[in-house]
Amino acid sequence: MTSVNTNYGALVALQSLNQTGRELSEVQNRVNTGLKVASAKDNGAVFAIAEGQRARVASLGAVMDGIDRATSVIDVGLSAGESIGDILKQLKEKAVAAQATDLSSDQRAALQADFNALRNQVDQIANAATFNGSNLVNGTNISGGSTPFTVLTTDSSGGSSGRFTLAGEAMVDGNANPFSLYANIEDATGLTIGATDAVEFSITNGNETTTFTVDVEAADTIEDFITRVGTQSDGRVTATFDAETGEISYHSQEQFTVTFTDGTDPADDDGFFDGTDDVTGTAMTQVVAPGAGSNSLAVTGFNFTLGATGQALEDVTSLLDISTSNGASAAATAIDDAITALNRDLATLGAQSKALDVQKNFLGKLSDSIEAGIGNLVDADLAKESARLQALQVKQQLGAQALSIANSAPSIVLSFFR
């Protein structure tokens, strides 16, 4: 039927042209923004996932900023420690010079004056080593103290992205006092260590299981042990020691199994290695599964001021007197001990700074991976969109021609009345 009231062909052509216009507008928006999902209207589910991951990237950036600040605090402490080390070397030089027996009283007095002046600079350097209000070398942020220095190392704790922790029993002496980082492991109450003892960490990733064996020696200090955990597991498992509670903890970004193997006879390790007290056997195993864990690292601080009890310069005090040969000899011995202890503490600070650098590098790679994942979800394929844009432009022109033809169709009715 031919009608001038209803032009079905024109209606169909108009619908097609409108659809092409909508598709063309969508493609133009993707080209303009570079995104195939620019708002929740485009794809609500994908948009929600992408926004959550963008928030994760922002939080990782904040964590890396915190690591940068912490690294600066450690670096300032290292600079102060190195300067104090230089002073100790000069003090040693003065003490050795004062051991000569041919010096006059005036010469000894001059050496003593120089010695005192150098020694008095130590506290000034230690107290000045402050960055952003934190100081790791004057005792204000000493490990186990009331104000420990902690660094956020990831944006969340627990779950698949957190750190998993297995805390052992307290490492204490016979009087139930926590050991220092430098105490021998074998001195712990009830802890038996013999030949060929070892701690094994097994990590399963898919179908592959990797086992790292950490040797344990009776003469090891706690510091020796926790350092060896990191080095012999290629950094995939680390250990930390809490000087206040006397506990050691193992950390990993992956699920792992820790096993203490007694190489001589069945013995109870007091839960220190495997986290299970009162268990004896040749292989005591504890599986550490994902769960609530720590997302921060406690940085070990020190006190490099003169005479600080239990610290590197404990014996370097105003009592050191090089005005006599015997006094100079005693001073040289005390300074030697201080240099050794200071270098040990500086090594710890340096290792912590390097650990933070490694963590920041990991977070940077993690952030890049997440951003790449966001891009896979929401980024537009501009080459594909360019080809589609040209096709839709041609289709739009053809649609306009088809609508024009459809609109002219009713004019044929005029020929019926000629």
Image (spheres, rainbow, N blue to C red):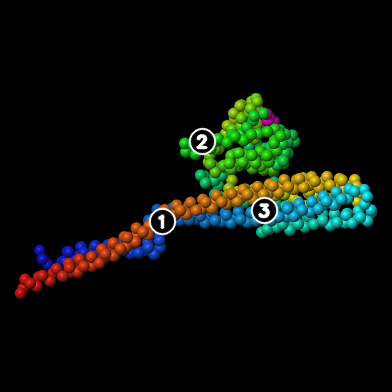
Q: Distance from label 3 to label 1 (Cα)?
A: 40 Å
Is 191 one of the magenta-colored residues? yes
Along the line of sight, the residue nearer the viewer: 351 or 51: 351
Dot 2 amino acid type: Thr
Q: Is residue 409 visible?
A: yes
Along the line of sight, the residue nearer the viewer: 228 or 257: 228
Point out the residue furthest to the bottom here. Answer: 418
- In the displayed structure, 417 sits above or below 254; it is below
Point out the tag, 2 or 3, that comes first from the N-terminus: 3
Q: Is residue 299 visible?
A: no
- In the displayed structure, 363 sits above or below 210; it is below
Determine which of the numbered discs, if any, sits on residue 74 in the image. 3
Point out the residue furthest to the right here. Answer: 105
- In the displayed structure, 387 sits above or below 274; it is below
Q: Which residue is mark 1?
A: 378
Task: Please provide percent x and percent y for residue 327.
Answer: 89, 47
Dot 1 amino acid type: Val
Q: Quick check: marks 2 and 1 in contact, CB under 8 Å?
A: no
Q: Residues within 10 Å of mark 3 (few under 14, many from 20)?
A: many
Dot 3 amino acid type: Ile
Q: Quadrant of the C terminus?
A: bottom left
- In the displayed structure, 367 sits above or below 287; it is below
Task: Please provide percent x and percent y for residue 233.
Answer: 58, 39
Q: Distance from label 2 to label 1 (Cα)?
A: 36 Å
Q: Tell me: 338 left or right of 208.
A: right
Determine which of the numbered discs, if any, sits on residue 209 in the image. 2
Identity of the residue drawn at 74% across and 50% down: 303
Is 167 one of the magenta-colored residues? no
Residue range in magenta is 190-194
Q: Nearer the viewer's eye, disc 3 or disc 1? A: 3
As helix, strand or loop, the secondary structure at mark 1 comes to helix
